[in-house]
Image: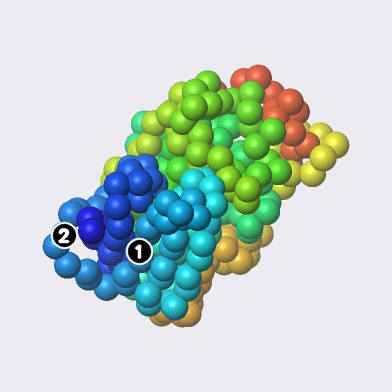
Amino acid sequence: MRRWLIEYGGVELTVCAKGDAAEELVELALAAIPSESVARTHGTKIVVGFDSESSNWTLVDHTAHVERKIKASGDLIYHLTDRIVFHIADRAENVHCLHAAAVAHNGHALIVPASSGAGKSSFTTWLAANGFDYVTDELILIDAEQKLQGIARPIQIKAHGLEAINHLVVEPELVQQGRFANAVPPASVGARFDTSRELSVSMFVFIKFQKGQDFEFECLSSGDAGMRLMANHVNARSLEGHGFRAMMKLIRETPCYVLNYGGFDTLPEEFGARLKGLLSG
């Protein structure tokens, strides 16, 4: 059995793979997540296996007593990385965990806080396909120096959302499909992972997708942005003052925007370049 040790925010997890098939898929899921091979389990234990008789993947989270049988590789990658994200967000200390996507350009991070189902993964795919380095589509950690680190899993696109991003995919054979979710590596849209620990928090973009909505991109007040950000702060209970003072300081020092749009076809052709200019400025 091969083991990978992962550590974020003081939280240790060990992912174990039973058999060659499981090892190959775990390697794909953890390709950009900092990890090291270990001989024994540290912290939370998550085991991935493959049952050749039933053609089912198996996922067992021993710490949370969760067991799943999964048919498709895309779904396995989703559930595995979801368990990793869950444990880090639940137990991380001395860092702010935000439910947010992030991309980067020249060391500057653009952060997209959003609740599940808001379209942050699809928008992140568009950003990655338009010249940004991919950081994460799910969870970021911000330390006391306002440096950012993301859980660098493949972009997760729900099954019903794959059609919307298909035109962005240049290497479809890299996409791991599933009945519930599809794992879209950045390379499949011509992008790369950015796993630097020195990324600066440089911009927040709060998105709202609504079919038929015209394109709107406007500055957001610190008060409004702060309330929106705290709604996506997932470990506030573990921090002094629920992290409010630190997040408001960050918001006051960081440009914040709101983006409303009705589809990728409503985004201006030069919008990616405009965002890069704002990050650099």
Alpha carbons under labels 1 and 2: distance apart: 14 Å
Tag shown at residue 239:
none
* Residue 24 picture location, percent across and down: 33, 43
Q: Residue 244: where, in percent of width, then height?
A: 50, 72
Q: Residue furthest right?
A: 212
> Which residue position is annotated with label 1?
47
Viewer-proximal residue, 129 or 35? Answer: 35
Q: Residues within 10 Å of mark 2 (few under 14, many from 20)?
A: some
Relative to 190, residue 77 above or below: below
Total label count? 2
Tell me, yes or no, whether the two marked residues, 1 and 2, touch with CB atoms within 8 Å.
no
| Residue that badge 2 annotates | 38
The quarter of the picture where residue 9 lies is: bottom left
Q: Residue at x 68, y 41 (%)?
A: 161
Using the image, determine if residue 23 lies above or below residue 192. below
Q: Residue at x 68, y 51 (%)?
A: 118
Q: Residue furthest front?
A: 53
- For the N terminus, the image quarter is bottom left
Residue at screen point 47% across, 73% down: 66
Circle 1 or circle 2, nearest the eye: 1
- How is the structure coloured here? rainbow
* Rendering coords of residue 189 (x, y %): 50, 27
Q: Nearer the viewer, residue 243 or 251?
A: 243
Residue at left offset 40%, top offset 54%: 50
Look at the numbered disc 1 and give the secondary structure of its residue. Answer: strand
The correct choice, above or below, for 198 with respect to 85 in the image is above
- Structural crowding at the residue carrying mark 1, measured as other residues with C-alpha within 10 Å and reported as few (<14), some (14–19) or many (≥20): many
Q: Nearer the viewer, residue 260 or 252?
A: 260
Picture quarter containing residue 58? bottom left
Left or right relative to 31: residue 89: right
Three-letter amino acid code at disc 2? Answer: Val
